[in-house]
Image: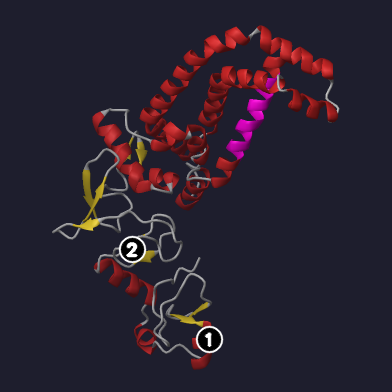
Amino acid sequence: MNRYAGYDCFVCGKKFTPDDDVVVCSECGTPYHRICYQQQNHCINQELHASGGSWKEIEDKKRLENGGGICEHCGHVNREKLAECEACGKFQVNMDDDPNGKRIIQTPLGEQHAFMSSDPYCGLEKDTEIGGERLEDIVSFISNNSVYYVTLFNHFQKTNRKISFNLPCILFPHLYFAHRKMWFMAILVCLLWIIFSLPDRMINMLSVFQDSEYLQILYQFGVNQQEITGITDFLTNNQALFESLQIPFFVLRVISQILLCLFGNYLYFRYVLKHVKEIRHRTSSAPKEVKKIVLLAEGGTNLWNVIGCFFLYQILLGLISGLVLML
């Protein structure tokens, strides 16, 4: 990541890109393309050297005054109305100006919420308490997409309501919870959905084991014919039971999807408050910087968790299906 992406090189005037090789003056912080600096062999921003100023502070102030915003993912100060951060490339909240020079964002509940684009706390004071915890700590723990969750969490507290709409939770709730490091909920949903899918899985397995061509392939690979016969007999003897469970289990799965869609955000809200409180207690005697590092490390999101949860679901599905066949 190049934190000078989008700024202008003092020598050639071209904007830095995330992949550029940049060198920075140790005295004033002015950045240059390495080749441009080698051509000059010294920093040419002598005005700042004389005043003792900082190039980045001045440039960032100009950007904010001109309507730019701070990336909630990496902290880079972007130019105004950019869809993606110049430094990290992540999506920026799409906001329009209002007559007062503020930004307006559509909240998850359809409300209009106005605040300065450079404000990571969405118009609230960083010492504001939500659920008994400081907003500054909550924002650090949420990390990614904090604008969405801060407005939503504040709404939960003000109205005492628990319902909102979470699209990932109606499609892939176990992956959503794993992405947000909520492993208890991720594993619980995996187990519930495996159980709800067992009748369909057992009936499908029966049709597979009744396929003579498939059985011949299994026998060629050394699978014991007696074991196959035992599994087939079990599935055949319980076919009526599995068929009777198909519709009720399907209905249960749909109900669980709807409930997770409506209460998924609130579950995350309670998860955030619980862990922020735990971290506050654990770091009570440590410097403030240490607490923030712990909040950032234990919160946020993790894409590898999603991949791990996907494979965990497949493993659990195979294990539970095997246990049912052994009954």
- Check the image and report above or below for 232 versus 167: above
- Residue 225 in percent (x, y) is at 83, 18
Q: Label 2 belongs to which residue?
A: 82
Q: What residue lies at 45% left-to-right and 50% top-to-bottom?
A: 288
Residue 231 vs residue 193: left or right?
Answer: right
Q: Name, please, the residue furthest toward the left.
A: 99
Pick whichever, 222 or 85, lies toward us.
222
Q: What residue lies at 63% left-to-right and 18% top-to-bottom?
A: 202
Tell me which corner region of the image, top left, top right, bottom left or bottom right, holds residue 30: bottom left
- Check the image and report above or below for 230 versus 292: above
Indicate the quadrant containing the C terminus: top left, top right, bottom left or bottom right. top right
Count up the numbered dots: 2
* Residue 240 visible in rendering: yes
Q: Magenta stretch containing residue 313, yes or no? A: yes
Please tell me whether mark 2 sits on a helix, a strand or a loop: loop
What is the magenta segment's predominant secondary structure? helix
- Check the image and report above or below for 110 versus 34: above
- Residue 76 in percent (x, y) is at 40, 63
Q: Which region of the structure is painted magenta?
A: 308-322
N-term mark: 1 or 2: 1
Q: How far apart are labels 1 and 2 at the CA level? A: 28 Å
Q: What residue lies at 75% left-to-right and 23% top-to-bottom?
A: 212
Q: Label 1 belongs to which residue?
A: 35
What kind of residue is marked 2?
Leu
Pick whichever, 258 or 41, lies toward us.
258
- Residue 88 in percent (x, y) is at 46, 61
Please tell me whether mark 1 sits on a helix, a strand or a loop: helix
